[in-house]
Amino acid sequence: MNNLLLEIQKGENKKLEFKVKFPKSETLAKTIIAFSNTAGGKLIIGVDDNRNIIGIDEDKVFEYEEKIASIISDLCYPVILPEIYIQNINSKILLVIEVFRGALLPYYLKLIKTLNNQEIPTNALSIILGKFDNSSIKCARFKGTNKEIFIDKKEFNQDLFFNLENTIKFLKNHLNLYAKVEELQLKENFEIKEEPNFVSVIFYRKKMPNIAEKMPNNSELNENEEKIINYLEKNKKIYSKDLIKVLDLKERTIRNILTSLVKKGIIKKIGKTKGSYYIKVSNYE
């Protein structure tokens, strides 16, 4: 049986992803970048989520190959060179993009924004590169069950991959090992599994975000938005009527500003009546 067909029958996993049709440019780029930053993988176009082989139009194969090369060149950095090829399974044409773990970590989207006529990287890219405020990992081990006495303490504030690697080292230094005999061999394991727990603690939010997801910060706020954030930092919550005095603006304009901040994920509205108010999102700095 075809090796690729065997992989498809096993279903999607960390190294295998299906797309029934050609994905959007950014979606494709993010998948390729994720594979390059981890253990590599294959993106197969022409297979649905239920492992059914749908195939693609054979006349569009050359067009798709050119488009993939263009997307990678335009959106991915450093340079990624995957293998792009077709497979004929059950008389259906599949397009396979095979990506290998890169040697120039980290890989990221070429996400550049313009601010005051100057091109700068987005906050997501800044976080990956360790240039974003508070993009650090703090590790500590305490004596006993409270946080009064430190046994060891470290802070890592370089790029994301350096931070992750050294966080894992710190944890391993302080985790207990246990051993058991399996098939006449002694196997040692940490009390916490390295995969995927260590990584998920760092990347987990309500949903697993893409590493290049854009996050807001003060450099993207206008003057009125910054005034609202400063007010919230001092007062913890704010009512729209309070802003009439703070900003000296009409109520409708204030509602628009608040709605914009909610959409950016910077503040959150509590309640739906006249007594509703706004608070600052806890993970926003």
Image (cartoon, rainbow, N blue to C red):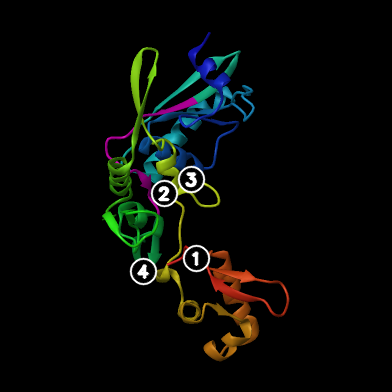
Q: Are marks 3 and 4 in contact (CB under 8 Å)?
A: no
Q: Position of residue 110 (x, y in %)?
A: 38, 50
Q: Residue furthest front?
A: 144
Identify the mark at residue 282; answer none if there is no mark: 1
- Magenta region includes residue 98: yes
- Give yes or no for contact between labels 2 and 1 (Cβ–Cβ under 8 Å): no
Q: Tell me the distance, in whole angstroms, between the alpha carbons under discs 4 and 2.
A: 34 Å
Q: Residue at x 40, y 42 (%)?
A: 198
Q: Is residue 157 visible?
A: no
Residue range of the region highlighted in magenta in the rendering: 96-111
| Residue 169 at x, y percent in the picture | 28, 42
Quadrant of residue 137 within the rendered picture: bottom left
Q: Secondary structure at mark 4?
A: loop
Circle 1: residue type: Ser
**Residue designated by label 3:** 26
Q: Quick check: 185 above or below 285?
A: above
Q: Earlier in the sequence, mark 2 or mark 3?
A: 3
Location of mark 4 (residue): 117
Q: Which residue is mark 2?
A: 202
Secondary element at image label 2: helix
Q: Main secondary structure of the magenta part?
A: loop
Quadrant containing the C terminus is bottom left
Q: CA distance from mark 4 to mark 1?
A: 31 Å
The residue sitting at 27% across, 42% down in the picture is 173
The three-letter code of the residue at mark 2 reads: Ile
Kind of element beneath mark 3: helix
Contact, CB < 8 Å: mark 4 with mark 1? Answer: no
